[in-house]
Amino acid sequence: MAALAAGLLLGPAAGCASTGGPAQRPSSASFTENGVTVDLSVDRWDGTAGTLTAVFTPTAAGYHLYSLDLPPGGVDGIGRPVSLKLRGGLEQTARPTTGAAVHDLQLPGGLPPVPVYPDGPVTVTLPVHRTAEGPATVLVGYAACSETKGCLFPVDAHPVEATVDGTSVRFAGPGPASPSG
C-alpha cells in the first residue's frame, strides 16, 4: 500500500533572524497508488491560508489523467476526475485549477468523448484556509488510463492526514528521510 512521506514543518513567517533550526520548507507528503504518484505540498502558508499543490504523475509512460471537470461518476461510467477534498481544519477557498490543457478523448463503440489531460504529470492547485487548529484530511481522487494499455483502477478518496495550527500544516505518516543538502 502507499506510504506517506515524512511531514516537513513549514516555518514561521519570513523576516525572523536565524533560530538555529532547519531552513523553512513547504509542508509535503507523497504516496503512490494504482499507477500514479501524488506529491502534495502546502505553499505560501501564512498561518491562516496558503495553497495546496498536488502533482499527479503516472508511474508508467503513456498514461493520462481525467480532467477536473469530468463528472464524479465519469461519462457513462468511464473515468474519474482528479479531485482534492478537504475535511477537518482546512477548507478550500476557490475551485481547484491546473494549467494543463484538456482535450476530448474519443472512445470506441460510439461512447461519448471524455475530457483528459495529455499523458504525463498534471499539477493541480487549490487555495485553502485554516478553519480550526487540529487534524485535517486531504481526500485525493483520480484515475489513469492509456489509449493502448487500458485503464488502472480509480482512486476515489485516498486520505492524507495533516495537523494544522497557527504556524504550520504538517503531513503525518512514515516515509523516507529528508535528503541532506
Image: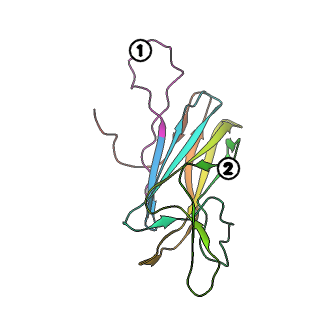
- Residue in front for this viewpoint, 32 or 118: 118
Which amino acid does the dot numbered 2 rest on?
Arg
**Residue at the spot 70% in from the left edge and 37% down from the top edge:** 132
Q: Is residue 9 magenta?
A: yes
**Helix, strand or loop at mark 1:** loop
Q: Quadrant of residue 164?
A: top right
Q: Nearer the viewer, residue 164 or 40?
A: 40
Tag 1: amino acid: Ser
The residue tagged 2 is 87
Element carrying mark 2? strand
Name the disc covering residue 86, or none.
none
At 58% from the left and 61% from the top, the residue drawn is 141
Q: Which residues are magenta?
A: 1-27
Q: How many marks?
A: 2
Report the residue marked by disc 1.
18
Label 2 crowding class (10 Å Cα cut-off): few <14, some 14-19, many 20+? some
Give coordinates of residue 97: x percent, y percent.
61, 48
Task: Relative to 6, say whether 122 is above or below.
Answer: below
Image x and y of residue 112, in percent: 65, 78
| Alpha carbon separation for disc pair 1 and 2 | 34 Å
Residue drawn at x 54%, y 56% as measured from the top left: 101
